[in-house]
Image: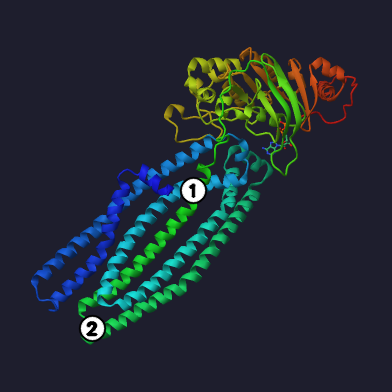
Amino acid sequence: MRIARIVGTCGGPYPYVLLLTSLVGGALSPVLVWAVKLLLESLTGDASAGSARTTAVVLIAVASAGGLFLPRVVVHAQAELNRAVERHMQKEIFGRLGRLDRLSDFESPGFLNRVNLAQRTAHAVPTQVVTGAFGSLQAVTAIAGFSAALFAVQPFILLAVLSVALLVAAVEVVTSRLATKAMRETMSAARRQAFYTMMLTNPTSMTDVMMLGTGGFWLRRLDGDLARSHAALAAVDRTTLRWQVPALVANAAVVAGAALWVTREVVAARLSVGDVTVVLSGIAGLTASFTTTAKTAGNAVKGFMLFDDYLAVVDIPARGAAKTLTRPAPLTHRISVSDLWFRYSEQSDWALRGVSFDLVPGTTTAIVGVNGSGKSTLVKLLCGLYAPARGTIRWDGSSIDGFDPEAYRDHIATVFQDFNTYDMTAAENIGIGDLSASFDRERVRLAAERAGVHTLVSSLPNSYDTFLSRAFLSGDQPQQEAAPVSLSGGQWQRLAIARAFMRDDRGLVVMDEPGSGMDAAAEAEMTDRLRWFAPGAAKVIVSHRMNSVRRADHIIVLKDGELVESGTHDTLMAADGEYRRLFVTQASGYLDAAGAAAVPAPGPAREGAAS
Ligand SMILES: Nc1ncnc2c1ncn2[C@@H]1O[C@H](COP(=O)(O)OP(=O)(O)O)[C@@H](O)[C@H]1O
Ligand SMILES: [Mg+2]
C-alpha cells in the first residue's frame, strides 16, 4: 500500500512508537477494569489473599499512570508523523505539477479540481490515515481486552454488545463515505469561492469593484455558492443522523438490559460485586472502543478515498514516457511549422487552421493580425506549451514532440503577452529569467539596460533591491524593505523583457506584444532591442501595431487562425491585401488623431483598427 510505504519511508521512528503505544494503550483500560474487580472482590472477602489486594493496587497504579502518560506520547508522535507525511506529499504534488509540460492541463476544471483535492489530501490524509490506523489499532486492542473480560463473566452479554457495536460502526463507515463524496462535489464551488474572495481583496480587481459597483454582485455570488455547498453538507449531516439514531437506541437498550441482568445475578449471589464493574465498565468500554474504531476507521476510509485524488495527480504519466525523449542541439538551420491545427477544447473553434511557415536563424519574423486571430496561440505552440491537434513543428528537422520539454524550453527566451509579475525584488524579478546565473548582479544590470529599465530601477528607493509587489504586502518584510513599490503596466513589462534578456544566448526568441503596455514610440524601439539577443537566434515578435514591426525580415499575417499572407513590409503593401488594409487603417487612425488628412486609402479601410 502506497500510504503505508510513505509512512514507513518518511516517518522515522514514529510509526514504531505509535505501534507500541497503540497496543499498550489499548490494553490499559481492560486491565484497569479487571484490577478494580480484583480489588473489590478482595475487599468483599470473595478473595481471601492480601497479595491479590496488593497486585490489584499496583495494577491500578500502573494502568492509571499509563493512561495519563501514553496519550501525550501518542499525540506527539502522531503530530510528528503527520507533519513528515504532509511535507512528503506536498513535495510530490508540486514536484509533479512543476514538471507538467502542457498548459492545457491547467486549463481543465476537472484537473484543477483534482489538484485542489490532492492538496487538501496532503493536508488531511496523514492525520486521517495515521490517526485512523493507529487509533483503530488501539481501540481494537481495547476491544479484545474488554471482550475477554466480559466473556469470562457472561459470553451472552458479550455477543449482544458486539452485534450492536458493529451496527454503530457500520453506520459510521457508510456515513463518512457520504461526507467524503459531498466534499468532492462541493470542490468546484470552493474554487469559485476562492475566486470571489480574490475579487474582493485584490487591488487590481478592487479597482473594477469600486468603479463598476460590483461589490454586492460578487458578494451575492459568494454567498450563493456558500449556501449551496452548505446545503449539500447539511443534507449529509441529516442523513447521518437518521442512520445513527436507530443504532444508538439499540445500543442503549443493550446497556439497560445488561444492567438489569447483572443486578439480578448479584442479588441472587450468582455473581460477585467485582463482576458488576466488569460487566458495566466492560459494556461502556466496548461501545466506546467501537465508536472510536468506527470514527477512526471512518476517517481512515475518508483518508484512503482522498488518497486516490493524491495519486491521480502524483501519478500523471510523463508524456512520452514510452518513447525516449531527446535533447535538442542548438538551432542551426530552421524551425519549420507545417499545417498546424489547434483548438483549446473539443467544443471550441479552431484557433489555428493549417498554419505553415519557417523561422530562420539570424532573422526576425513578425506575426501580425487583429485581436483573437491566433498570434499568442501560435507562439505558445512554438514553445511546446500546447500540443497541436494536427501538424508538426520541426527544430532542424526533428519534431519538437520528441524533445524533452525542459531541454527544449532551455533553448527559448520568451516574453508572453500575459507576462508574470513577482512579489520579489527588482533584481529577482529580472534574475529569475536564468536561475543558473544565480541573480548575478552584473548580468541582471545588463539585462535591465537592454530592456531600457535600468534607469527606472536605479531610481527606486532601494535600487535593485527594492521589493516590488502588486499586492502591497505589508508587515512581513524586513525593515529595510518595508515599503514595497508597485510599477505601472509598461514598467512591469520592461522588467519581463529584462527577464528574457537573462536568456540572451538562446536559439529562439519569442516576444508576444512586448510593447503593448508602452506608448507607440517605446514599442517600436522594442524591435531594435531584439538585436541584443544572439545574432544567430530566430526571433519572433508579435504585435498588432503594424508600424512597430515593419522592419522585420519576414512578416506573416494571421486572420481567424489562418495564415493569409506573408512577405516583407514592401511586398505585403504592394500585394494590397489584409496587411495593407490593417496598416492603412492604423495609419489613418493616427493621422486623424493628429488632425491631418487621412491617407488616401487604396484598400478598404472601413473595419475598426486592429487592437
Ligand atoms: N486559454 C485559452 N482557452 C480557450 N480559448 C482561448 C485561450 N486563449 C485564447 N483562446 C481563444 O483562441 C483564439 C486566439 O486567441 P489568441 O491566440 O490569444 O489571439 P491573439 O493573440 O491573436 O489576440 C481566440 O478566439 C481566443 O478566444
Ligand atoms: Mg495575443
- The residue tagged with tag 2: helix, strand or loop? helix
Q: Which quarter of the rendering shows the C terminus? A: top right
Name the spot of residue 165 as percent of width and height, x first: 39, 70
Q: Nearer the viewer, residue 459 or 8?
A: 8
Task: Report the residue marked by disc 1.
Answer: 120
Q: Classify the position of ligand 1 by quadrant: top left, top right, bottom left or bottom right.
A: top right
Of labels 1 and 2, earlier in sequence is: 1
Identify the amino acid type marked 2: Val
State the image quarter where residue 512 is shown: top right
Is 141 displayed left or right of 474 in the figure?
left
Name the spot of residue 203 as percent of width and height, x first: 59, 38
**Front of the two marks 1 and 2:** 2
Badge 2 crowding class, 10 Å Cα cut-off, few under 14, some 14 to 19, many 20 or more, is some
Badge 1 crowding class, 10 Å Cα cut-off, few under 14, some 14 to 19, many 20 or more, is some
Q: CA distance from mark 1 to mark 2?
A: 54 Å
Above or below residue 104? Residue 68 is: below
Q: How is the image coloured?
A: rainbow
Tell me what residue is drawn at x 64 percent, y 25 percent.
490
State the image quarter where residue 233 is shown: bottom right
Q: Is residue 560 among what the camera can see?
A: yes
Q: Is residue 593 among what the camera can see?
A: no
Is 513 displayed left or right of 91 in the figure?
right
Badge 2 residue CB within 8 Å of ligand 1 = no
Task: Report the residue marked by disc 2.
Answer: 266
Are the residues tagged 1 and 2 within 8 Å (C-beta)?
no
- The residue tagged with tag 1: helix, strand or loop? helix
Identify the amino acid type marked 1: Arg
Is 567 displayed left or right of 597 in the figure?
left
Is 117 displayed left or right of 364 in the figure?
left
